[in-house]
Image (cartoon, coloured by chain):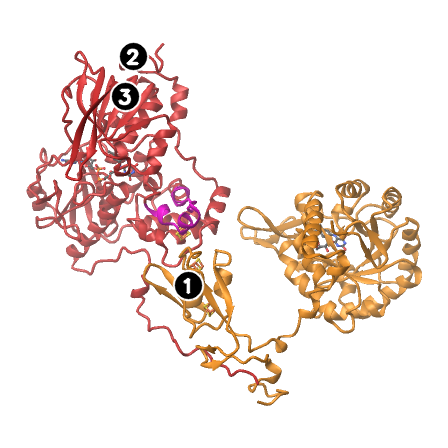
Amino acid sequence: MADLTTDFVGIRSPNPFWLASAPPTDKEYNVRRAFEAGWGGVVWKTLGAEGPPVVNVNGPRYGAIYGPDRRLMGLNNIELITDRPLETNLEEMARVKADYPDRALIASIMVPCEEAAWKAILPRVAETGADGIELNFGCPHGMAERGMGSAVGQVPEYIEMVTRWCKTYYDRPVIVKLTPNITDIRMPARAALNGGADAVSLINTINSITSVDLDRMAPEPTIDGKGTHGGYCGPAVRPIAMNMVAEIARDPETRDLPISGIGGITTWRDAAEFIALGCGNVQVCTAAMTYGFRVVEEMTAGLSAWMDEKGYASVAEVSGRAVPNVTDWQYLNLNYVTKARIDQDLCIKCGRCYAACEDTSHQAIAMEPGRTFEVIDAECVACNLCVDVCPVEDCITMTRLEPGETDPRTGRVVPAEPGNWTQHPNNPAATAAE
Amino acid sequence: MTDPLTPGLAAGRLSPEEIEGNFADLHAPLGPRDAAVAADRCYFCYDAPCIAACPTEIDIPLFIRQIAGGRPEEAAKTIFDQNILGGMCARVCPTEDLCEGSCVRETSEGKPVEIGLLQRYATDSLMRRQGHPYNRADETGKTVAVVGAGPAGMACAHRLAMRGHRVTLYDAATKPGGLNEFGIAAYKSTGDFAQTEADWIMQIGGISFEGGKALGRELSLEELAESFDAVFVGVGLAGVNALAAEGAEKDGVTDAVRYIAELRQSTDLASLPVGRNIVVIGGGMTAIDAAVQTKLLGAENVTIAYRRGRDRMGASVYEQDLAASKGVRIICNVQPVEIHGNGAAAEIELEYTADTGDGLRGTGERLRLPADQIFKAIGQTMTLDSGLELEGGRISVDAKYRTSMEKVWAGGDCVAPGDDLTVWGAAQGRDAAEDMHAALMGVPEASTRAVIAEAARGIDAPPHGHAPHPDMPG
Ligand SMILES: Cc1cc2nc3c(=O)[nH]c(=O)nc-3n(C[C@H](O)[C@H](O)[C@H](O)COP(=O)(O)OP(=O)(O)OC[C@H]3O[C@@H](n4cnc5c(N)ncnc54)[C@H](O)[C@@H]3O)c2cc1C
Ligand SMILES: Cc1cc2nc3c(=O)[nH]c(=O)nc-3n(C[C@H](O)[C@H](O)[C@H](O)COP(=O)(O)O)c2cc1C
Ligand code: SF4
Ligand code: SF4
Ligand code: SF4
C-alpha cells in the first residue's frame, strides 16, 4: 500500500485530502464527523474579527447546475464567512485539535485590511494549537463589498502586505488562498511569495450567475425578487482551477512555492491530476457537500491503489510530475501529424462525427452507403473534434503519421525532427531559418 | 364464487381489484425526471436510422431534444406534424420492430432509447392541454368523403381538414376509432384513450362524423364519388378467416377480434365471461392479445397454438415474451383438426405439422387439449365488395394511394400489400390526403418527409482540397 501521509509545508496529515474552508468545517460537530470518516485535515470555516459576527441571508444561498439525472455539476453560493462568534470557533478548534493530534487543522482568517486587526486575531488562533493559517483572499461576494476577501486578493500589493503582517505576528505556516477572479493568477501568487507565504491554495470560488428565473426575471438564488452574483464551485470549475495551478507551478518565480489544490475535486483521479500539476495536497468542498463525508474513502483507496499500480511510494513522488509537459503553444511540435481513424467494429453508425466534421469543420468524413463513416485523409486536419463527439470510447483514435510518410492533405513528407512555431517560415519572428 | 378453476365460461374469475390491476398501463408513463434521463440517452444521430424506421417518419432526435430542453409540448408538435395519431402510436407501436429496433443504441448495447415512452410523455403533455394545436387553412370549398374512421381514415380526415377541405367521416360503427377503439389490447390503450384521441382529432373542425353508415349498405362508392370531390376508403378488414376444423361451429368457438371488441367496450371487465381452459389458434398480434387478455381476466390455462415454427410467428419476439411472462403457453407446429364436445367445446384435437417447403403437412401425430373457449385469430379479410380492383384480396393502390376508380383513394389495412399496424394507417391516410389535396387544388404535393435527406440538400459538393495547407517548419 502506497503511503498517503503528506507533509505539506511542515504540516503532517495521514492523507492529502483536506476539507476546504466552508460549511463542512463550520463547527466542531462537523469536523469530528469528518475526521472519523477519514479526512486528513480541515481548513476551518473562515473566522472574522472579534465582535458581532457577520450575518447570512435568510433565503436560499445556493444555485446549481445539473446534468440530466440531476447530477450536481456546479454549485454557486452567496454565503459569507462563519456567522458564529469567534470565541466559540476558537474553543471548538482547540478541543478538536487536542483530540485529533494526527490530523491537520488550519484556521482560515479574514479580517479587515489593517495591521491591528491581524495582530489582534493571530495570537488567539495560535493558542488553539492550529497547525497553520489560511488567508481567505478569495470570497467573491458580500465580504468583498466590505474591502475584504477577493477585494484584497485582486490587488497583489495588499496580498503581499497582509502576508507579511501574518509572517510577523504568527510563527506557524501561512497559506494564502487565491481568488480566480483575476486575469493572471501568477501575479497574486508572486505577491504571496514576496510577502513570505509558505504556500498558496487555489482556487476559491468564481463569480457567477448560475441561472435566471425567467418568470420573475431575476438571477437565482432569488431573495425577495433580487439576486446577486455568487461563487461557483464543483466539478464544472475543475479545468479552470487546474490551469491556474499549472500556471503557478511552471512560473519560474513561483515554481518552488507549495500549492494546495482546490476546485471541483470529486474522485481520487481528480486529486491525482491536481497533484501531478504540482500540488502538495488537495482540498475538497462541493463533493463533500453533495455526497457527505464518506466520499473520502473512495478518494484515499483509489489514490493509493493507483500509486501502487504505478509504483509511486509517496504523494510527494507524484507531485509536479506533469509540470514539465505543460508548455506554451509556440513550443508545440508542428511536425507531429495525426489522422483520425475510425474503428469500424466499434462504430455504432450514429453519424455524429460526420455531422460535426461536415457541418462545422473540415468535411473530412465521408458518409458511405450503409451508414459507413470513413475519414478522408486528404482533408483531415487532425482537430480531434470527431473523437470528442463520438459516443463510443476509443472508436475514433488519432494515429500518428510516421516520419517519412506523406501527409495526403499537404502532400508533404513528415520530417523526423520536431519543429515549432518559433521556427516556422510564416512566423515573422522565426528564430531558425529553413 | 367463481375462480380460475371454475369450469366452462364464467365471469368474475378474479376480484374487480385484481382485474383493474391487471389491465393497468403495460408500461407506466414517464414522469419529467425519467423523461429527462431517457431523453439524454439519445445521441441526436445524423440522418437518424430511427426516423427511417418510423412509417410516419417522425423526427425522433428533434422531438427527444425538445423534451431534453424542457419543452414536451413542442416535442409533441414535432410528432403530430408527422403523425396525428402519435399518442396512440406511442402506446401500441411494436417499437422493437420499428424505431427502437433501429436505434443505434439497440444495435450497440441492446438497450435502445425509449422512443415510445418518450413519445407518450410528449403527446400526453400536449393533449392534456385545452384546445387543439392545429388551425385549418382557409376553406377551399372542396368536399371529401372518408369512409372508415380507423387510424387511416382519421389521419386522412385530419390532414384534409387542415388543408381547408370539408370532410364527412363515415363509419359503419356508431363511434370513430376503428381498431383503436375495438381491437387494441386494453392494457395498451387505457382510460378510454381511443375516444379521447378521436375527439381531440375532430377538434380541428371541418370534419363531420356520421356513424352507422356502411359502404355496401347505406353508402355506395359511385354515389359518394358523385356527390363529393374525392373519396378515401379506409375500411380495414372487417371479415375473419374461417377455421378449417371439424366442430368449428360449436359453442365456445369465437372470433378473437369479436371477443376483444366486446372486452374493449365492456364497462365492467369482471362481468365478462371467460373460459377456464383457453386455446387460441393463430400466431399474430391478435392471437397474443386474445391470449394475454383472457389470462388477465383469470383463465386458468391459456395456450396459443400456431401452425408453423416460432420464427414465422407474426407477433414480435417482444410480444411472445410478454405472453410468456403472463403465463401463456405457446405451442408451435400444430394445426386444429377437430373440436370435441357435446354442443359446447370441451376439447381441441391438434395435429403436429411439418413444413416441407411446398406447404404445411400434418405429420399424423396428434395432441388433445382441454378447451372450453377457442379463439380464432387466423387473420382478417376484406369482405366488402366495393367494385375496386383488388390485389391479394385487398384494394390495389398505386404509390399515391389512388385506386382503380377515378376520385377514389384508399389506405390502411384494406389496401395491399398490408402491414396492418396503426402507424401504417396513419402514414397512408396522411399521404393520401396530401395527394388528394394536390389533385383537388392543382398544386404540387407537399413533402411528408421529416428531414431533408443529404442527397436533396442542393448544396455544392464540399470544398475538398481547399483546407489550409500550411508549410512544415524547418
Ligand atoms: C386484436 C388486434 C390488435 C392489434 N394490436 C395492434 C397493436 O398493438 N399495434 C398496432 O400498431 N396495430 C395493432 N393492430 C392492427 C391495427 O389495429 C390496424 O392495423 C389499424 O387499426 C388499421 O387501421 P385502419 O384505419 O386501416 O382500419 P381499422 O382500424 O380496422 O378501421 C376501419 C374502420 O372502418 C369501419 N368500416 C369497416 N367496414 C366498413 C364499411 N363497409 N363501411 C363503413 N365503415 C366501415 C370500421 O368500423 C372501422 O372503424 C391490431 C389489430 C387487431 C385486430
Ligand atoms: C457554501 C460555501 C461557502 C464557502 N465559504 C468559504 C469560506 O468561508 N472561506 C473560504 O476560504 N472558502 C469558502 N468557500 C470556497 C471553498 O473553500 C472552495 O475553495 C471552493 O468551493 C472550491 O472547491 P470545491 O469545488 O471542492 O467546492 C466556500 C464554498 C462554499 C460552497
Ligand atoms: S480530426 Fe477533425 S478534421 Fe479530422 S476527421 Fe475528425 S473532425 Fe474531421
Ligand atoms: S461518431 Fe463514432 S460511433 Fe458515431 S458514426 Fe462516428 S465513428 Fe461511428
Ligand atoms: S437512433 Fe436512437 S440515439 Fe439515434 S437519434 Fe434515434 S433515438 Fe436517438
Which kind of residue does numbered mark 2 sit on? Pro
In magenta segment, residue B112 = yes
Front residue (pair B375, A180): B375
In magenta segment, residue B102 = yes
Q: Is residue A47 visible?
A: no
The residue to which callout 3 is attached is B278
Q: Residue at 41% of width from left, 46% of height from top? A: B112
Which segment is the magenta one? Answer: B98-121
| Closer to the eye: label 1 or 3 | 3
Provide the major secondary structure of the magenta segment.
Answer: helix
Marks 1 and 3, how far apart at CA: 54 Å
Left or right position of A331 against A203: left
Q: Chain of mark 2?
A: B
Q: Position of residue A222 (x, y in %)?
A: 63, 50
Residue A124, numbered circle = none
Residue A355, numbered circle = 1
Q: Is residue A57 visible?
A: yes
Chain colored orange: A
Q: Residue at 87% of width from left, 59% of height from top? A: A173
Q: Residue at 43% of width from left, 77% of height from top? A: A408
